[in-house]
Amino acid sequence: MRRLLLVAAVSAALTLSPTAAATAAEPDLDPDVAHALDALPGGVLVDESTVQWPRLGMTLTVAAESVLSVGTCSTGYVCAYSGSNRSGSRLSFAGCSVWSTAALPSVGSVANARTSGWVTARNASGASIAYAGYGMSVNTPAGVTSIACAGDGVTF
């Protein structure tokens, strides 16, 4: 009987406790959202990655990791395109290595959607002829035969 009364008392206390109820209802906030809410009064939480200040006409939207993609090159990948400005056919490569671009008739641009490092477009002799830092793309001159990324032991 005592155990039943203790469980009932704890349940009632948790139900009546505003901090317990508020904590249970809070979504997982991005640290930038939490900072914005603390730093600027009047913010309204729209979701775990968006805050609006209606009186200021301002919105903060925290970029999701998927936004790190570069055009159609998904986050974490390196891509080679047959056309300039990430157009035409696309080859996508995961990880960090040296990849042949022989599957494309020519390479007009490369994109580096990895979250760090850089990639280089190389010609048949292995010389680097174009570079793209992470989150960037670059148009390439004619003659690209392979792509390599930093950290694979390749000397550029």
Image (cartoon, rainbow, N blue to C red):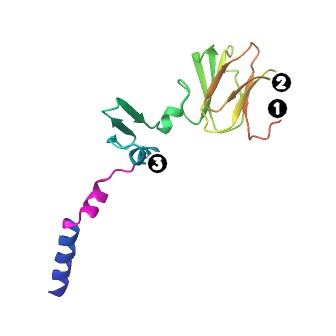
Residue 112, percent across and down?
A: 63, 30
The residue located at (62%, 19%) in the rendering is 81
| Depth check, front residue: 62 or 78 | 62
Residue 72: % across, % down? 53, 24
Q: Where on the picture, by quarter, is residue 155? A: top right
- Which residue lies at the image location 56% right of the left edge and 27% below the top edge? 70
Q: Alpha-carbon neighbours of circle 2 within 10 Å: few (<14), some, or many (≥20)?
A: few
Number of dots carrying numbers: 3
Q: Earlier in the sequence, mark 3 or mark 2?
A: 3
* Looking at the image, residue 60 lies above or below residue 138: below
Q: Give the labeled residue for mark 3.
A: 31
Q: Amino acid at mark 3?
A: Pro
Q: How far apart are the two marked residues, 3 and 1, measured between alpha carbons?
A: 37 Å
Q: Is residue 49 visible?
A: yes
Along the line of sight, the residue nearer the viewer: 31 or 57: 57
First in sequence, mark 3 or 1: give its number.
3
- Residue span colored magenta: 16-31
Q: Which residue is mark 1?
A: 156
Residue bearing mark 2: 127
Q: Which residue is at the front of the view, 33 or 148?
A: 33
> Left or right of 39: which side holds 25?
left
